[in-house]
Image (cartoon, rainbow, N blue to C red):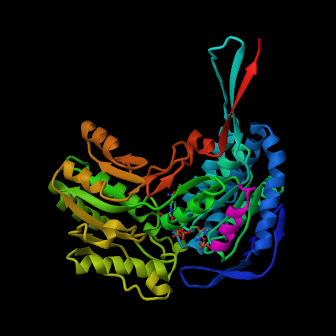
Amino acid sequence: MTDLARDAYIDGRWVTGARFEVRDPFDDSVIAEVTDCTDADVDAAIAAAARAFVTWRAQPGPARGVLLRKLGERMLADEERLARLCVRENGKPMKEAVAEVRYAASFLAWFAGEAERTYGEIIPASDATKRILVTREPVGPCAVITPWNFPYAMLARKLGAALAAGCTVVAKPAAQTPLGTLAMAQLGAAVGIPAGVFNVVTGTRAGAIGARLIASSAIRKLSFTGSTGVGRDLATACAPDLKRVSLELGGNAPFVVLADADVDAAVEGALVAKFRNTGQSCVAANRFIVEQAVAEAFTSKLVAAVAKLTTGRGDSGVDIGPLIDDKASHKVAKLVADALSKGATLAHGTAPSGQPGPAHRLVAPVVLTGITPAMALWREEIFGPVVAIRVAADEADALAQANDTEYGLVGYVYTRDAARQARFADGLQTGMVGINDGLVSTAQAPFGGIKQSGYGREGSHHGVEDYTQLKYVAQKVG
Ligand code: NAP
């Protein structure tokens, strides 16, 4: 592949060294050999981010916004190449990869605007001789750790907000998908983002790299997207230095269909909420909770729709690509087998084998009914193309079932009744609610969770605020 960036990007320079292989999850072919960063590389990136912070924060917000906007525009101009790269390293279908590039670019455009609007306040003082000024300052150099499932988008949501606020970034992408992040660094350099403002450290030693970033007092914030267990450990490690932390963690989203729902709309929403990125999304519908009266209609219509989904190589026009690795396909197979052994019914598809090897990573959609809380998939993220349906006796039962989880990222509900919509909007214990909507993510809205799904928000003006700290200035004027 021409133009493919394979080296780490530190202080405006491409840094080579020992290499690790990045493989295509569809067939295990090697796409590239990428720099496996050493501790010294990580230290150099931290030092560069600290140096660059001094001048970057001093730039007017609109000037920072210009560069962010240009980066977003360059991504769009290059969307075909970026999407193909994402298909190779992540496996997702091409149409979804294109959508991800556009979604990522939309965050850069949004935060370019927000860079112009990090407003302060003047608060009326009780003392006539004083003025109370409140300004927003950037928190400082930030460590940004992202997962493999949306390589561009997860980075853009953090990078855009951080750079808009005046922070600098050391990004650590997942070892399985570093190429998209490096491609963004390449475009960032092309549009003139100054050296040291956006650094990328790549590598296979995630724990050591994370620990190094956290150990440095120059790093003032960690923004992490990934699993709840790792996020919890990283937050603990950040505590002694009192670093700011944002955590976008796992989900276990309920998808509720009430008796009065438009069943066809619910099926349409379910397809998006469940199968995007082959089910490997933190906002994926994990538990379908369907009121008795429409359970049969919803299940049969969903099965008919699911039967049309095609599976294969991401760039061959399919709806569903391979799972990311053998661990993922083994986990999905184990969850399906566990459910079947505890009495679930296979309404569509066949139980995946869970065997190692690329052929077994292509998991065709499965629909299970008769789900109970005793089954592991009720508690755990499935992260695969498996629909798990449980019947609810009534609205109250559906809401109680929906909240029966330690996670709280997003909940979906389908109902035409305004009062029921309001009760679910208020009653769902989640950071986000989709009402008759299976796709809630957008740059204008605050994305994030509660409970074991983490804290902090990405997108909207709240996304920038997460990278700022307030300063109060008391000014004697009389
Ligand atoms: P993960 O294992 O926690 O990995 C996420 C990132 O953390 C990767 O860059 C990984 O690097 C790195 N990492 C792993 N162990 C680390 C450690 N000890 N110290 C520092 N960094 C470490 O998560 P995953 O399983 O790949 O990703 C899927 C999870 O992310 C799911 O739970 C999903 O729900 C969640 N997610 C949440 C959101 C959200 O916005 N709430 C969005 C997307 C995904 P390596 O890959 O190189 O090991």
Residue 194 in sight from this viewpoint? no
Residue 340 occupies quadrant: bottom left
Residue 126 in sight from this viewpoint? yes
Look at the image and say whether residue 211 sits in the magenta stretch: yes
90 with respect to 168 (left or right): left
In the rendered view of the protein, which quadrant contains the C terminus?
A: top right
In the rendered view of the protein, which quadrant contains the N terminus?
A: bottom right
Residue 477 occupies quadrant: top right
Residue 289 placed where, x, y %? 26, 58
- Residue lying at the far front of the rendered structure: 240
Q: Residue at x 64, y 52 (%)?
A: 242
**Foreground pick, 313 / 337:** 337
**Residue 246 drawn above or below residue 137:** below
Q: What stretch is highlighted in magenta?
A: 206-219
Residue 218 placed where, x, y %? 75, 56
Total count of labels: 0
Look at the image and say whether residue 297 sits in the magenta stretch: no
Q: Which residue is drawn at 25% across and 70% down?
A: 374
Residue 443 placed where, x, y %? 56, 46
Q: Is the magenta stretch mostly helix, strand or loop?
A: helix
Q: Residue at x 72, y 56 (%)?
A: 219
**Foreground pick, 118 / 104:** 118
Q: Which residue is drawn at 30% across and 77% down?
A: 349
**Residue 77 drawn above or below residue 380:** above
**Foreground pick, 104 / 124:** 124
